């Protein structure tokens, strides 16, 4: 299941469907595999489902390494919030960095 999800997230839908087919051949009643296979059935290779975390983010902007480091320190060192909230903010910041890298590579 993990491999199928990763493949689908990376746009390799046909391979993900192939993995799910093997999972369903071994465990035909697997609800998670059946649901993911159903969602991927009509999706074309290269297509990705929208990630709600990415949709909620502002568009990436160019920044200097020092500004990025300061933002990380500010977010992680903020007194508000619990450990989980800080980890979630880190995930959001990492998603912004990753999207910026991906956009820069185009």
Image (cartoon, rainbow, N blue to C red):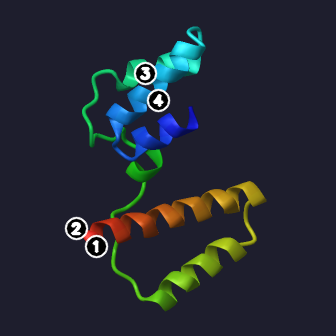
According to the picture, the residue beneath numbered tag 1 turns out to be 104
Please state, as top left, top right, bottom left or bottom right, where the C terminus lies in the image: bottom left
**Residue closer to the observer: 29 or 55:** 29
According to the picture, the residue beneath numbered tag 4 turns out to be 19
> Where does residue 35 sit, x and y in percent of width and height?
48, 18
**Residue closer to the observer: 57 or 33:** 33
According to the picture, the residue beneath numbered tag 3 turns out to be 37
Secondary structure beneath dot 4 equals helix
Q: Circle 1: is it few (<14), some (14-19), or many (20+) Cα within 10 Å?
A: few
Check contact, mark 1 vs mark 2: CB within 8 A. Answer: yes
Which of the numbered marks, if any, corresponds to residue 15? none
Task: Measure how far apart labels 4 and 2 are at the Cα level.
Answer: 29 Å
Task: Measure how far apart labels 3 and 1 are at the Cα level.
Answer: 32 Å
Task: Measure how far apart labels 3 and 2 are at the Cα level.
Answer: 30 Å
User: Considering only order in the chain, which callout, 4 or 3, is on the residue closer to the N terminus?
Assistant: 4
Quadrant in which residue 80 is drawn? bottom right
* Left or right: 78 in relation to 29: right
Q: Circle 2: is it few (<14), some (14-19), or many (20+) Cα within 10 Å?
A: few
Up/down of 87 relative to 19, above or below: below
Task: Measure how far apart labels 3 and 4 are at the Cα level.
Answer: 9 Å
Which of the numbered marks, if any, corresponds to residue 106? 2
Closer to the eye: label 4 or 1: 4
User: Considering only order in the chain, which callout, 1 or 4, is on the residue closer to the N terminus?
Assistant: 4
Secondary structure beneath dot 3 equals helix
Closer to the eye: label 4 or 2: 4
| Residue at 35% from the left image edge and 41% from the top image edge | 12
> Where does residue 81 sit, x and y in percent of width and height?
73, 60
Closer to the eye: label 3 or 2: 3
* Left or right: 79 in relation to 33: right
Q: Circle 4: is it few (<14), some (14-19), or many (20+) Cα within 10 Å?
A: many
């Amino acid at each position: 299941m993990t491999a199928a999800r990763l493949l689908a997230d990376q746009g390799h839908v046909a391979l993900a469907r192939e993995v799910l087919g093997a999972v369903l051949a071994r465990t035909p009643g697997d609800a998670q595999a059946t649901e993911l296979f159903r969602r991927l059935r009509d999706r074309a290779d290269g297509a990705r489902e929208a990630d709600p975390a990415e949709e909620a983010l502002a568009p990436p902007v160019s920044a200097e390494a020092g500004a990025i480091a300061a933002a990380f320190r500010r977010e992680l060192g903020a007194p508000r919030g619990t450990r989980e909230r800080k980890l979630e903010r880190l995930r959001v910041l990492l998603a912004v960095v990753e999207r910026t890298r991906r956009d820069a590579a185009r």
